[in-house]
Image: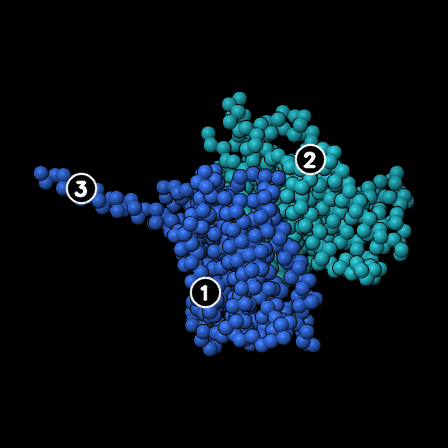
Chain colours: A cyan, B blue
């Protein structure tokens, strides 16, 4: 991550926070607004960070994955289904239900990762099409099961959505008790594990034999093959690991953010995660920083809702949630044009390896 | 002397078969993909406690059982044909347009605006011969612009069209939500729905048969499919699109401006998707309502791939998808299997068409054909 890029990211986040302070500053103390913006940014950046990490594992091994969106959507559904089934049918306590739900989400992601690996490594299907298949499959299956399981008479839940076991609680930090900035650091478990996974991924990719082999397979599979690395096996393993991380990202939607499932609820986060990965130059820290920019754009939309009434008339368009909601998407497109400098994908990204 | 003649005869027969083989193969794999997906769909229906045979009978009845059913199938198939052609044309040019949904939505919004507001804005009454082409043209223009933007970004900055077209879908969704809930909302005092007012009489294309919803948009879709085939196969532009798609370096060497071709291809693709929206507005609904187009973009990809990106194949695949969507309502009515099962079957069809190796393996079909190559890195 070069300094120019880092400076750009810091600037955008500052601008986004500045807008909310300008709008709401008269009513609420700026400190509270800044703390609220930062806390929301870190929280809503979680699925983007995890999606981008999924992309990094896949693409560093040479497999393009645009199925992250579908992986997260399916995981969000099955994680939620597992938690709600355990809690309401098997009478398990809320906390263990939620944790098993997270595991179910991770497994769902891993399974879809396996499917993507079968399609792109074994059958050498065009990887963009393979990813699209996963996206469409996820929309179809979750839409069908959601209707069938929760809204049909005679289903296991008797035709109605049962009471949800809640969401994963914030992790308390005793040192920060009572401090005004506590909410920035006291995040929920998946948000915390996303940051931990950024560190872990950085270490794995650049300081372990596994990482070296992964990068070799993604940059020059023939050379890797020549020195005895099993290209297909490395790609399989990394795509499945990536899928599991996307699965954790999916769990964020239904087990950490809100205690419910809605069709299409991932709302393009999987694709924005890919843009974060590209802007972050396929590095874990870069991807995380980029994910925070998109998180800040989303936090802007959420926080502006609180100050709708205070928005001065010349800034009336900021009252429109639909207009402010455009910011993450426009930002993604601007970033992809490379106006802030080009990035370089792994050399063999998206190319099936023929022995 | 007679031996060579005897030997020659089977040789001719076998070359004829050889010539037919690609055509048979091109049809065989999609058919088997549909069949296999339907079999798995039956297992899914069975698994949720339904009767697959009754469900499929309901599906068939609902799609083809009466004149009304057939007419509804064409109504469903019409936007699918346009959007499928849009994706297929982009595929021919080596581009992946996931943005048909956004282009369609903007086409519909633009057509609706010209349809209901233009006469008032100009302060004149437009005759139908002028107003109808203007309305359809506005839809084409809006879709074309919405498609050309990611094309231009791809050609001039290298930004990958897959992410950009998806982003533009969300932008289109947000902006149409804003417009249909705000400035363009139907001002009728009883209206609570996010929709435009009805378009003027002069912008409406009347139905073909009174009492049936089958509309001229379907006829136009078939004609456009023929035109797309003609352009791709018989014109210089089509040659440029296909060469730029198959081998950009060779195209450049042959003097084709690849970046210009990318923009033109994406624009034409957007025009086709925009037509899907425009015909719904001018020939069927006479207004645009929020949410009618959700999912068309992804369905269009499945249709383009199932039709092997050939215009005739796209028309057939669109009719199949239209029949399934239409018949699903009757299926749900008769057997309580939710219509969403169709999405699962369609996703499976796409899976088997994309990974045709699986189908070849199940049914022991040998020969391979050329495959689509789209993934050439992100060019970030």
- The chain letter under disc 1 is B
Q: CA distance from mark 3 to mark 2?
A: 67 Å
x, y percent for residue A216? 58, 27
Whether marks 3 and 2 lie on the same chain: no
Circle 2 packing at 10 Å, graded few (<14), some (14-19), many (20+), is many
Which residue was labeled with disc 2?
Answer: A284
Q: Is residue A321 visible?
A: yes
Quadrant position of residue B117: bottom right
Residue B345 seen in this snapshot: no
How many labels sit on residues? 3
> In the figure, A118 relative to A78: above or below?
above
- Residue at the (53%, 75%) spot, across then down: B127
Q: Nearer the viewer, mark 2 or mark 1?
A: 1
Outermost residue toward the left? B1
User: Image height check: is A123 above or below A84?
Assistant: above
Q: Residue furthest top?
A: A227
Upstream in sequence: badge 3 or badge 1: 3
Tag 3 and tag 2, C-beta contact below 8 Å: no
Q: Are marks 3 and 1 on the same chain?
A: yes
As helix, strand or loop, the secondary structure at mark 1 comes to helix
Query: What residue is rendered at 47% in x and 70% in y?
Result: B215
Q: Which residue is mark 3?
A: B8
Image coords of residue A282 (percent x, y): 65, 35
Circle 2 chain: A
Q: Is residue B14 above or below residue A236?
A: below
Q: Is residue B353 above or below residue A4?
A: below
Which numbered disc covers residue B220? 1
Same chain, labels 2 and 1 = no
């Amino acid at each position: 991550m070069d300094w120019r890029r880092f400076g750009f990211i810091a600037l955008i986040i500052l601008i986004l926070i500045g807008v909310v302070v300008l709008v709401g500053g008269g009513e609420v103390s700026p400190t509270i607004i800044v703390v609220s913006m930062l806390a929301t940014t870190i929280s809503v950046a979680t699925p983007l960070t995890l999606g981008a990490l999924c992309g990094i594992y896949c693409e560093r091994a040479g497999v393009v994955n645009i199925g992250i969106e579908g992986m997260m959507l399916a995981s969000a559904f099955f994680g939620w289904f597992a938690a709600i089934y355990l809690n309401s049918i098997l009478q398990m306590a809320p906390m263990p239900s939620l944790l098993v739900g997270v595991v179910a989400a991770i497994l769902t992601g891993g399974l879809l990762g396996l499917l993507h690996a079968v399609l792109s490594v074994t059958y050498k299907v065009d990887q963009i099409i393979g990813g699209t298949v996963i996206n469409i499959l996820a929309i179809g299956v979750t839409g069908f099961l959601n209707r069938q399981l929760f809204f049909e008479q005679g289903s296991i839940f008797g035709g109605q959505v049962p009471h949800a076991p809640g969401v994963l609680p914030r992790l308390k930090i005793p040192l920060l008790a009572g401090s005004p900035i506590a909410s920035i650091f006291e995040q929920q478990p998946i948000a915390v594990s996303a940051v931990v996974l950024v560190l872990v991924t950085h270490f794995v990719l650049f300081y372990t034999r596994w990482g070296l082999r992964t990068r070799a397979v993604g940059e020059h599979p023939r050379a890797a093959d020549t020195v005895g690395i099993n290209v297909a096996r490395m790609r399989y393993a990394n795509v499945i690991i990536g899928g599991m991380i996307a699965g954790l990202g999916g769990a964020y939607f239904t087990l950490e953010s809100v205690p419910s499932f809605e069709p299409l609820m991932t709302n393009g986060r999987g694709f924005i995660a890919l843009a974060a990965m590209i802007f972050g130059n396929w590095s874990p820290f870069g991807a995380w920083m980029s994910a925070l920019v998109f998180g800040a754009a989303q936090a802007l939309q959420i926080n502006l809702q609180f100050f709708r009434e205070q928005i001065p008339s010349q800034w009336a368009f900021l009252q429109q949630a639909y207009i402010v909601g455009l910011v993450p998407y426009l930002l993604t497109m601007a970033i992809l044009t490379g106006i802030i400098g080009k990035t370089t994908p792994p050399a063999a990204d998206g190319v099936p390896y023929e022995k | 002397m007679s031996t060579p003649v005897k030997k020659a005869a089977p040789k001719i027969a076998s070359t004829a078969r050889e010539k037919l083989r690609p055509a048979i193969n091109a049809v065989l794999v999609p058919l088997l993909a549909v069949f296999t997906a339907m079999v798995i769909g039956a297992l899914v229906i069975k698994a949720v406690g339904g009767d697959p045979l009754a469900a499929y009978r309901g599906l068939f009845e609902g799609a083809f059982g009466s004149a009304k059913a057939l007419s509804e199938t064409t109504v469903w198939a019409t936007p699918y044909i346009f959007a499928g052609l849009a994706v297929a044309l982009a595929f021919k040019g080596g581009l992946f347009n996931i943005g048909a949904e956004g282009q369609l939505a903007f086409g519909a919004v633009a057509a609706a605006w010209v349809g209901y507001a233009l006469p008032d804005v100009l302060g004149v009454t437009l005759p139908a011969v002028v107003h109808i082409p203007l309305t359809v043209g506005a839809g084409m223009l809006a879709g074309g612009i919405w498609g050309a933007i990611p094309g231009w970004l791809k050609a001039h900055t290298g930004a990958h069209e897959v992410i950009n077209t998806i982003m533009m879908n969300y932008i289109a969704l947000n902006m149409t939500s804003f417009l249909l809930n705000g400035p363009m909302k139907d001002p009728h005092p009883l209206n609570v729905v996010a929709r435009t007012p009805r378009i003027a009489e002069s912008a409406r294309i009347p139905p073909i048969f009174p009492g049936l919803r089958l509309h001229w948009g379907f006829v136009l879709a078939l004609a456009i499919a023929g035109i797309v085939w003609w352009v791709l196969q018989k014109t210089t532009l089509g040659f440029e699109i296909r060469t730029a798609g198959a081998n950009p370096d060779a195209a450049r060497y042959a003097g084709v401006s690849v970046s210009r071709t990318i923009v033109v291809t994406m624009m034409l693709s957007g025009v086709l998707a925009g037509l899907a929206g425009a015909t719904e507005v001018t020939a069927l609904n006479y207004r645009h309502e929020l949410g009618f187009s959700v999912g068309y973009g992804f369905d269009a990809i499945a249709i383009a791939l199932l039709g092997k990106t050939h215009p005739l194949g796209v028309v057939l695949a669109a009719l199949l998808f239209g029949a399934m969507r239409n018949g699903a309502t009757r299926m749900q009515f008769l057997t309580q299997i939710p219509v969403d099962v169709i999405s699962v079957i369609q996703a499976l069809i796409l899976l088997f068409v994309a990974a045709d190796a699986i189908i070849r393996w199940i049914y022991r079909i040998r020969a391979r054909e050329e495959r689509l190559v789209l993934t050439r890195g992100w060019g970030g």
